Image (cartoon, rainbow, N blue to C red):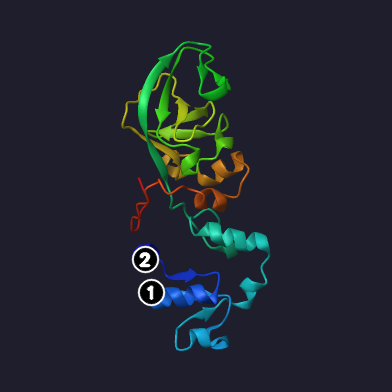
Amino acid sequence: MASEAAGAAALRVSSLAEAVALRDGGVTLELLSPVAASDSALASGRDIRPLDESFEAQDAAARRDLGAGVYGLAAPAGLATAPVMTLAAEVIAVKSVDAGTGVSYGYTYRAPRTTTIALVSIGYADGVPRLASNTTTATIAGVAHPVVGRIAMDQLVLDIGAAGAAPGDTVTIFGDAAAGAATAVEWALRTRRLPGNLTAGLGRRVERVFLRGGVTP
């Protein structure tokens, strides 16, 4: 599986049945289950460890952070983490517009000056929250640009000002702050959701690419 291929040392599962299914499916990583293998005939003969009592005593917020930590979005129990997910799309059109021009549905954004806008191939059907409309940024070549107008089903718009862009250019929706991108945590805060909900909510149309020891470009 992808986690094993990427070098994960262990997997936390939500149930003993899930741990058994993974072990029977050939996963050899250490598996941490809420129920000890010795407590159930279902897990007889399988190497499945129970989660320790200190974890079971953690509150809901701590457990939520542990899930977000899988993506490097939190650091539960003092563990250091780093972002490992990048959501990217591409520019599909670039257009110069005059001051006062309305952008996207309902014209919730009007260009304050003559500017250039870039149409990007991702939208709310792909899991990009509509609350990101007019509230957050995405980057092209490490430069942040505001997401303007209402996010459509499969497109969003950036006001890129005088910056250059062309169809086919990569747009980083969220990713590693060290590379100049807005982070998933920032996107989550601006769209009023938990980081884990944001990353888990990406649609089926978003292609998943897993890189060992690196971040998706």
Nearest to viewer (mark 2 / mark 1): 1
Q: Earlier in the sequence, mark 2 or mark 1?
A: 2
Under circle 2, the secondary element is loop
Quarter the N terminus occupies? bottom left
Image location (x, y in percent) of residue 184: 51, 45
Q: Which residue, given by chain and number where applicable, does mark 2 sit on?
A: 1
Q: Quadrant of residue 3?
A: bottom left
The vertical placement of 214 against 118, above or below, is below
Q: Which residue, given by chain and number where applicable, does mark 1 sit on?
A: 25
Q: Amino acid at mark 1?
A: Gly
Viewer-proximal residue among 85 and 148: 148
Residue drawn at (33%, 55%) of the image: 211
Residue drawn at (43%, 50%) of the image: 85
Image location (x, y in percent) of residue 117: 43, 22
The vertical placement of 58 against 65, above or below, is below
Residue drawn at (46%, 27%) of the image: 158
Q: CA distance from mark 2 to mark 1?
A: 10 Å
Image location (x, y in percent) of residue 110: 55, 17
Under circle 1, the secondary element is loop
